[in-house]
Image (spheres, rainbow, N blue to C red):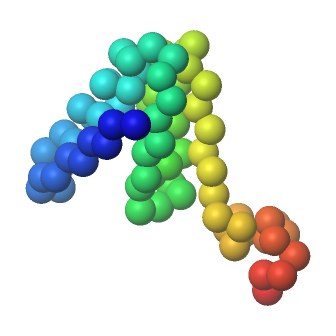
């Protein structure tokens, strides 16, 4: 498995470059880690728009609890 790390200042186009690369890569599996669930959803939406054939899944931790909903894990408060 290849690893790609992109380092640069905020607003320098890192995310856009990475998403374009993923969208053009065909059916190769990718894992993308971002700091927030909101950014993960935004990236997923953009990827689906760039290449509707891709299967894009946002995986959230078991302690994730959207406002007004039950946590994914029963052990979480």
Q: Position of residue 70 (x, y in %)?
A: 84, 69
- Residue at the (19%, 40%) spot, across then down: 13
- Residue at the (63%, 51%) spot, across then down: 59
Taking the image as shown, residue 12 lies to the left or right of residue 73, namely left
- Residue at the (60%, 45%) spot, across then down: 58
- Seen in the picture, residue 5 relative to 47 is either above or below; the reply is below
- Residue at the (33%, 37%) spot, across then down: 2
From where the camera sits, is residue 49 visible? no
Residue 73 picture quarter = bottom right
Which residue occupies the foreground of this view, 31 or 51?
Answer: 31
Which residue occupies the foreground of this view, 6 or 9?
Answer: 6
- Seen in the picture, residue 75 relative to 11 is either above or below; the reply is below
Q: Residue furthest bottom?
A: 77
The quadrant the C terminus occupies is bottom right
Q: Position of residue 36 (x, y in %)?
A: 47, 61
Q: How many numbered callouts?
A: 0
Q: Position of residue 8 (x, y in %)?
A: 12, 52
Q: Residue furthest front?
A: 1
- Seen in the picture, residue 9 relative to 67 is either above or below; the reply is above
The quadrant the N terminus occupies is top left
From where the camera sits, is residue 38 visible? yes
Taking the image as shown, residue 67 lies to the left or right of residue 12, namely right
């Amino acid at each position: 498995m290849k690893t790609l790390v992109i380092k640069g200042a905020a607003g320098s186009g890192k995310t856009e470059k990475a998403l374009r690369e993923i969208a053009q890569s065909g059916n190769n599996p990718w894992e993308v880690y971002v700091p927030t669930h909101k950014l993960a959803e935004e990236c997923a939406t953009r990827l689906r728009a760039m290449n509707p054939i891709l299967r894009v899944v946002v995986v959230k931790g078991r302690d994730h609890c959207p406002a007004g909903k039950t946590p994914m894990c029963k052990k979480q408060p």
